[in-house]
C-alpha cells in the first residue's frame, strides 16, 4: 500500500478508534477514582485509601491475584507452545496452503 492509502485508511479509522479509546478511558478513570474514594455513590466523596487497606489485608485478594498470575503464565506458555509448531508447519508449502495463507 502506498503512503497515501495508509493515510486515508488511518483518517477513516480515527473517529471510531477515538470513540472507543474515549469510552474505555472514561470507564477506567471512574473505576480508579472510585477505588480512591472519589465519585462515591453512598456518601461524601473524598480521597481515601480505606478500600485498598481493606483489600490488601484480605487473604482472598492475594490468592486471587496469585491465581490470576498463574492462569496468565500458563495460558501464555501454552499458546506459544501451540503457535510455534503451527507457524513452522504453515511455512512449508502443502496442497491448499495458498487458500490458508495467500502470497
Image (tube, rainbow, N blue to C red):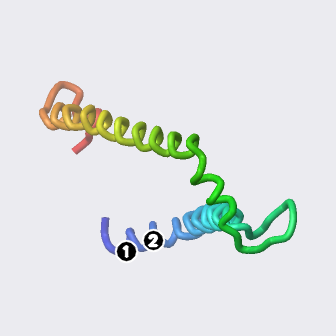
Residue 47 vs residue 17: left or right? right
Q: Name the residue tied to disc 1.
A: 4
Quarter of the image where the N terminus is located: bottom left
Question: Which one is in front, 62 or 95?
Answer: 62
Question: Which one is in front, 103 or 16?
Answer: 16
- The image quadrant that residue 77 belongs to is top left
- The image quadrant that residue 98 belongs to is top left
Extreme residue in the top direction: 95
- The image quadrant that residue 69 belongs to is top left
Residue 31 vs residue 100: left or right? right
Q: Are marks 1 and 2 in contact (CB under 8 Å)?
A: yes
Quarter of the image where the C terminus is located: top left
At horizontal 57% and vertical 65% (from top left) the residue drawn is 21
**Res. 88 mark:** none
Query: Rounded to the nearest whole Å, what is the CA distance between mark 1 and mark 2?
Result: 6 Å
Q: Name the residue tied to disc 2.
A: 8
Give the answer, above or below, for where 15 lies relative to 94: below
At horizontal 87% and vertical 65% (from top left) the residue drawn is 43
Picture coordinates of residue 22 (x, y %)?
62, 68
Visible in this render: residue 53? yes
Picture coordinates of residue 68 (x, y %)?
47, 41
Visible in this render: residue 26? no
Which element carries disc 2, helix, strand or loop? Answer: helix
Amino acid at each position: 500500500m502506498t503512503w497515501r492509502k495508509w493515510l486515508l485508511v488511518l483518517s477513516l479509522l480515527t473517529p471510531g478508534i477515538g470513540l472507543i479509546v474515549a469510552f474505555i478511558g472514561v470507564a477506567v478513570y471512574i473505576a480508579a477514582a472510585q477505588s480512591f474514594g472519589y465519585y462515591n455513590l453512598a456518601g461524601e466523596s473524598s480521597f481515601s485509601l480505606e478500600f485498598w487497606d481493606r483489600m490488601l489485608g484480605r487473604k482472598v485478594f492475594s490468592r486471587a491475584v496469585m491465581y490470576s498470575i498463574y492462569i496468565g503464565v500458563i495460558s501464555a506458555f501454552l499458546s506459544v507452545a501451540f503457535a510455534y509448531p503451527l507457524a513452522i508447519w504453515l511455512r512449508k508449502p502443502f496442497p491448499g496452503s495458498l487458500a490458508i495463507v495467500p502470497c
